[in-house]
Amino acid sequence: MFLRQYVPMAIAFVMGVVFAVQYYVPHPASEELLTTVNDWLIVVSGFSMVLGLASLMGSHWAKVRRGGPGWGYSLVVFLGILGTLAVGIASKGKMFAGEELTLTALGWVYDNMLVPLQGTVFSLLAFFMASATFRTFRARNLEAGLLLTAAFLVMLGHVPLGEYIWDKVLGFLPPKADQVMGWIMNVPNMAAKRGILLGVGLGMIATSLKIIFGIERAYMGEGG
Amino acid sequence: MTIFLLMWPLLAFGLELPLLSASDLPGDDGKAVLLLWPRMPYEASEVFYVVQGAEGPEGPFEEIARFPSNSHYRTERRAPFWTWRKGKDEHFFVVRTIGGRPLESGREYYFRLGVDLGEGPSFGPAVSAIPKPNWFDFKKLNNLIFMVLLAGVVLWFIGRARKKELFLRRIPGLDAIEEAIGRATEMGRPIYYLTGRLGMSSVSTIAATIILRDIAKRTAGYDAQLKVPHTDPVVMAVCREVVKGAYLEAGRPDAYNEEINFYVTDDQFSYTMAVDGMMVRERPAAVFLMGYYYAESLLLAEVGASVGAIQIAGTDAEHQLPFFVTACDYTLIGEELYAASAYLSKEPALIGTLRAQDVGKAFLTAFLVLGAIASTIGVWAGIEHKIDYFLDILRDFS
Amino acid sequence: MRKLAEKILSMDRRAIYLLMASAALLPFLTGPLGLPSRVSPEVKAVYDRIESLPEGSPFLISMDFDPASKPELYPMAEALVRHAFRKNLRVIGMNLWVTGSGMAEKILSDVAEEYGKKYGRDYVYLGWAPGATNVILGLGQDIYKTYPRDYYGNETSGMPVLEGVRTLKDIPFMVDLAAGDPGIETWVVYGKAKSMAGGCTAVIAPGMYAFLNSGQLVGLIGGMRGAAEYEALLKEMGKATVGMDIQSTTHVLILGLILLSNFAFFATRRRR
């Protein structure tokens, strides 16, 4: 009970107070403390990767052993991990080598696998955005109508073709499409974002204070 | 020629050089020196001040800065009134390097000030100062006072909440949790809970783990299947403890399985594709997206919507809110995510902090309005320098 | 009419995906639309700031993005590095995202080759170092301690390109190109550079306007449009300008879909 509950609470309290105070102390010792603790975090994250890797390998190995549905894909996971590790070690972690800076095996994997795969996944957003807007951007009530109008104007002002359409259809109006978009982004959008950020900031302070003073202990699990 | 005509009395009768003073710059890390000297009658844009510094009394002196003599007044320094007197009666200059080398704390440095009328600078006597590190930055005093006040208000309301029931408005997203879990139990399909992209150092992730505890307790009670894929191993370790504790509290230790929380990968889109694939194959009945998200928010939410899951999202990432609002059934916006633990547990201590947040927000709004009115009056009446005394209290000087 | 409206409302999402793909491919078939982007004040501010730097000034560019954000931030980085080399500035490149190292290196070396710039004298690529916050704090104290060696393993102290540069305060202007965290906010909070501008993906750009308005950022280049505007200022047609054609057609398609769905929605509602 002492180790599971009181020791973590004490650590949370001490570290919370120390780093709250650290912000007000300009002495080099204070910045040294901050960088040291950040280094500790990096080290802990490094070790925790072992934990994550063990969990990942464990669940996929169990699937392969059981011969459950999709076990072949679990084999692909192993091949991917071990293959990239081998390639990375062989290339000594470098993407380019030699005076001519030729592409190493790791560089080849990066250029021909990681870059196109990440780009492909990110590009899915365009399709999902289209289907999401078609499904939900309907003027069901006043608020939805306002949202729809603002989104319409911002999208129109964001692209050259939109500006061209605006000039042809609403060119008689004094503001141009990009000016309307700029006003929406800089005025109502900014006001709303600032409001949300203020609330989030206060929420963060309150949550942090709850954790520092031990009022909030749910994150401790069994000890909480 | 113009300069000569203007300055010939000084050249003829001898130039009076300003008296330079040097001291440690207060409230810093000990790597800067503050130079001050009075305003002189002959100052003009054509007359230059030249600042030189050396590591020894005999030099060699190196030029640090050269600027027109009608600049660098006290008024131009950005500092609050309780640490710095503003005015145009004195000049200031902050020295951080000599010859490109940063000043070292505890070491004596020598400075001299020269006046250049166009014929080369004439220097006054050298003065010395030792930069020292300070333990408190008084420029942030207003920040500290506000923080202590807010902490005090939080603790006061916690005490008050224990004696008197405080009103809490409905948060539809949190009320829908019971409905979502019930739906998953009836349909015999799993519940997915995602904790966001950031690690345990993020307050939104902490808030997500707190909500997870409540959901895990309910799924244990309903005997529903819970799955929590992770992108951060530390968060996974914490969530394992949270879920285990929740199952124990619900009296269902037999139903607990360590594989409820499992690690996928820390790469953003690899994680997204893995979770999307799981959602398409297993068709969860409920998906909870709590925490901080980036571009993957819509990818996750849209796939969840396509498999017919009821989706409840909660994030303080304001740039992803539009996507969650569009694709999810319920969205907790910003601080509603942090309010979840109080809302779900109804614990007085936690509800008290929510009320304290509201009081803080009321004060912020009042200061916003007062600050805007004060600034406007300052500009209209030409008394900005007087209004600055009030506005300094609200400014950040970090 | 009602039946048509109901059919439209229940349109298979795969049909929408197909329309989207067609809109994206259209500019490849029709050729460039040739429509210019009007330059916004926030992008012009970045351009003007670089223009105001004297020749030989150090210029730091932190390319904090991964391959997923390549379409938006790669052209931005190229345009900025091109501008810096045109002004004969000393370019210092780095990144806080490990998966972006390859791209950052490629941008610097490709553009440097175009302008005949020499590594070590005109530009340097410091690479990635762990612990984003610590790296930025370290740069504020001593660049050589934070990066004792560059990306290729060369010692940084004594490099001509870094002459007179010891800390962030010795760099008159820097730009951070970010796709998330660590990114612009991290640099603003921990870096406290003398003068800083930001470039980011379009989705997080609205959140950066607060820093722009407060003066913490001198300018902001948002998304592919911002990159296209910058290319227009440099009088070059780069990848962003080409990409804007695709953005144009897809945006107009989405606008059309919104109008269609609302028309169908009201058509079905009226009858009820």
Image: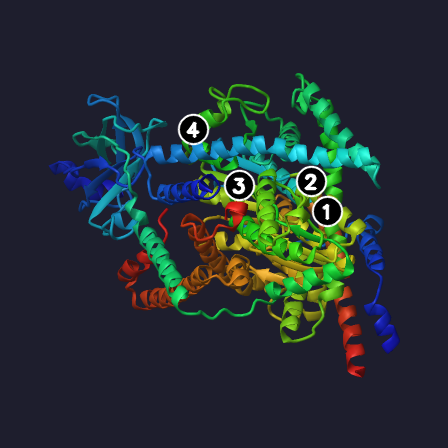
Label 1 with label 2: CB-CB less than 8 Å:
yes
Mark closer to the observer (4, 3): 4
Residue matched to label 1? B275
Left or right: C238, with C185 as reference point: right
* Of the pair C230 and A46, the residue shown nearer to us: A46
- Location of residue A145 in the rendering, given as x and y in whole percent from the top left corner: 66, 72
Query: Which chain is mark 3 on?
Result: C
* Of the pair B70 and A15, the residue shown nearer to us: A15
Pointers 2 and 4 within a single chain: no
Few, some or many residues within 10 Å of mark 3 (<14, 14–19, 20+): many
Which element type, helix, strand or loop, lies under badge 3? strand
Q: Quadrant of residue B137?
A: top left
Q: CA distance from mark 2 to mark 4?
A: 38 Å
Q: Quadrant of residue C13?
A: bottom right
Image quarter of the N terminus of chain C: bottom right
For residue C175, the mark is: 3
Q: Earlier in the sequence, mark 1 or mark 2?
A: 2
Query: Which chain is mark 4 on?
Result: C
Q: What residue lies at 40% left-to-right and 50% top-to-bottom? A: A213
For residue C142, the mark is: 4
- Location of residue B90 in the rendering, given as x and y in whole percent from the top left corner: 21, 46
* Of the pair A54 and A35, the residue shown nearer to us: A54
Which element type, helix, strand or loop, lies under badge 4? loop
Left or right: B193, with B91 as reference point: right
Mark closer to the observer (1, 4): 1
Eyeballing the image, is C74 above or below A39?
below
Which element type, helix, strand or loop, lies under badge 2? loop
Residue matched to label 2? B264
Left or right: B110, with C186 as reference point: left
Q: Amino acid at mark 3?
A: Val
Few, some or many residues within 10 Å of mark 4 (<14, 14–19, 20+): some
